[in-house]
Image (tube, grey):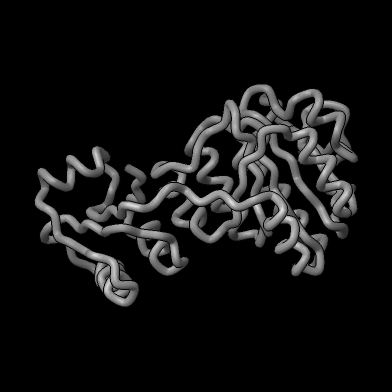
Amino acid sequence: MNLIIGRKPVLEALNSGEEIQQVYILHGQKGSILDAIRIASKKRGIKCSEASTEKFKSITKNDNAQGVAAIKSEQKYFPLEEIISSSKNSPLPLLLILDSIQDTHNLGAILRTAECSGVDGVILTKHNSAQVNETVIKTSAGAAEHLKICQVNNLVQTLKGLKENGFWIAGSSLENYKNYIQVDYKVPLALVLGNEEKGIRRLTAESCDFLIGIPMKGKIQSLNVSVAAGVLLFEILRQRGN
């Protein structure tokens, strides 16, 4: 069973047109967001039921559900070709590629930043990567429901295909990099972020057009990947005048 938990994530899912089968609200819960959830469910013809404490706990198995949960269809992943095609509606397309991100909270935080920064699509590696689940959706504050996300088996081939479609590939790295503020991002761009511990893989790095990094001033040599995502994506926006 695929769940969306949390008030804002459920409301965002309803408003984004996500395929929701049913909504459950813990009995006795009140509030403006819950009223909006009830109204949105009714408009879309989705059953919205009150559930006893026992039933709600049996459905969510999560103490942070904020008294609301939605049962959804399988996570929708878009074909890569569709993401590339739709991105070209932007004057300067921007894609985000996540190479083996394994922590669901990191993935959720990155997706939230991606949506806020206007990313046109997100590409995930299929193996050794976190899946888009209820934790990711809740951590993203519902942003995952507004993004076009796809999964790929072979990232090197994917990067090759992106280059053939006019994209430049920038990889975030801790070695042999250019300072991230000294790079021109006013081109169709795909930004690659790597695994929390190991960074982007060697073949991935070799497939990038250039490597960028955030210089560290302290004793710790790297930022959390979700924080790095925010720094890099909003520098791209700044340069582009957005």
Horizontal arrangement in the rendering, residue 40 relative to residue 241 (left or right): left
Residue sitting nearer the eye, 217 or 74: 74
Q: Tell me: 214 left or right of 82.
A: right
Residue at 57%, 31% (x, y): give it: 129
241 or 84: nearer the viewer: 84
Image coords of residue 215 (percent x, y): 78, 35
Residue 118 x %, y %: 66, 62
Q: Is residue 90 above or below residue 147?
A: below
Where 12 falls versus 181 (above or below)?
below
Q: Is residue 69 above or below residue 203?
A: below
Camera-side residue: 187 or 74? 74
Quadrant hosting residue 187: bottom right
Total numbered circles: 0
From the viewer's perspective, is residue 161 above or below residue 127? below
Q: Residue at x 60, y 56 (%)?
A: 148
Residue 239: x and y in percent read 82, 60
| Quarter of the figure with the N terminus | top left
User: Which residue is found at the position 80% from the left and 40% from the top?
Assistant: 159
Q: Quadrant of the C terminus?
A: bottom right
Q: Residue at x 32, y 77 (%)?
A: 43
Q: Tell me residue 200's x, y (percent).
A: 73, 29
